[in-house]
Image (spheres, helix red, strand yellow):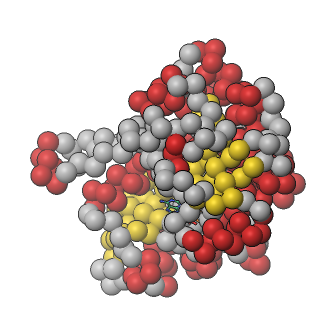
Amino acid sequence: MITEVVKPSEIHKVDPVFGQLSFDNHEQIVFCNDKDTGLKAIIGIHNTVLGPALGGTRMWAYNNEWEALNDVLRLSRGMTFKSAVTGLDLGGGKAVIIGDAKTQKTPELMRKFAEYVHSLSGKYITAEDVGMETADMDLVREVTPYVTGISESKGGSGNPSPITAYGVFMGMKAAAKFKFGSDNLEGKTVLVQGIGHVGESLVDHLTREGAQVMIADINQARLEQVRDAYGATIFGGEDLYSAPVDIYAPCALGAIINDDTINKIQAKVIAGAANNQLADEKKHGQMLLDRGIAYAPDFLINAGGIINVYAEIAGYGKDEIMRRTENIYNTTLEIFGHAASNKITTHQAALQVAQGRIDARKLEQKK
Ligand code: NAD
């Protein structure tokens, strides 16, 4: 995905919104400002052909408004393709609130934000993202019904991370089937980078299947905790990208497949939960293909979370959530097949399949 931020010194060279490099024909961008609560937020609605634009709200202390705008445009576009490739009747949207979630988030600010969400009459539906908690979504719910990811006790779908991890596990198995001829991960060496909410649950699935799991994290206490709980090995080398493993699962940061890391990667399969793993979608996707590394597109295999919150709108239960998440295995295999037969990257293949669904629906709507 395009990630460039227009430098303030070059502001005169582009149209500030429609000229943004991350602007991809977004349908609507809403700037929300409230002096009394200090709310400054942007809601990005990328595409609503398949359904209401659903995506989380991120609260972050951006360095400037350009960064915030760039982030919301990039993230909302990503949601369109994630939901489309997963087969959900949802469009893509996302919101960012500018500020430090630890010091500037107040109930008044969240309620005011919820009023803006409500003013869109359901065209945008919000959820939790970085800087937000389930309790914040419960607050938003007091003002508007256009919110998902509220507490289970209030009828919501609860914590999405274990479902996300299950989908990543399914996507990884499909990638292994494509690359190694078998989806059985027993005996395979897997490096999980980032053992937070999703990573830990992925380690659980992997160790149950008999994989040799290595873990890496910047949090030493967590490393020891997860090692003790699952018998995983803490990665002890100098450079984790050069680790001689079969599978690499990025579950921490975005843009970790970049000019500095890509040529060091020894793994034959990359399948993880982190969003936007490719620093440059086209260039790094192609380099992975050229190096014979099977890359399971992040936005496809980490869709368990959105499948989970979509249950609140579509009204299905846990069994259907698990069935749809398990189906990430089949979709991933289809994407690998589509990429191989068209000699394109898996990332491009997933985008094409997603776009194909949107275009077909648009045609139907015109009839
Ligand atoms: P989390 O914050 O619980 O865990 C992230 C972990 O990564 C933490 O343990 C952190 O210490 C570690 N980390 C941070 N920087 C690191 C570094 N440089 N090297 C190694 N480890 C590092 O987050 P999460 O909910 O587990 O999500 C993980 C990733 O998956 C994120 O990129 C998130 O956007 C993506 N994702 C999550 C969900 C979900 O349902 N939680 C859904 C879709 C995508």
Numbered label tally: 0
The vertical placement of 120 against 354, above or below, is below
- State ligand 1's quadrant: bottom right
Q: Residue at x 47, y 65 (%)?
A: 58
Quarter occupied by the C terminus: top right
Question: Picture quarter containing residue 193?
Answer: bottom right
| Residue 225 coordinates in the image, percent (x, y) | 69, 72
| Residue 347 coordinates in the image, percent (x, y) | 54, 32
Quarter occupied by the N terminus: top left
Question: Picture quarter containing residue 152?
Answer: bottom right
Q: Residue at x 27, y 56 (%)?
A: 66
Residue 246 shows up from this direction? yes
Q: Residue at x 44, y 77 (%)?
A: 101
| Residue 283 coordinates in the image, percent (x, y) | 41, 30
| Residue 84 coordinates in the image, percent (x, y) | 62, 39
Left/right placement of residue 111 relative to residue 68 reads: right
In the displayed image of the protein, which residue is found farthest to the front?
Answer: 237
In the displayed image of the protein, which residue is found farthest to the right?
Answer: 319
Left/right placement of residue 260 relative to residue 214 reads: left
Q: Nearer the viewer, residue 269 or 24?
A: 269
Q: Nearer the viewer, residue 104 or 362?
A: 104
Q: Residue at x 64, y 60 (%)?
A: 234
Residue 350 shows up from this direction? no
The vertical placement of 255 against 154, above or below, is above
Q: Nearer the viewer, residue 296 or 221?
A: 221
The vertical placement of 199 against 87, above or below, is below
Q: Nearer the viewer, residue 301 or 22?
A: 301
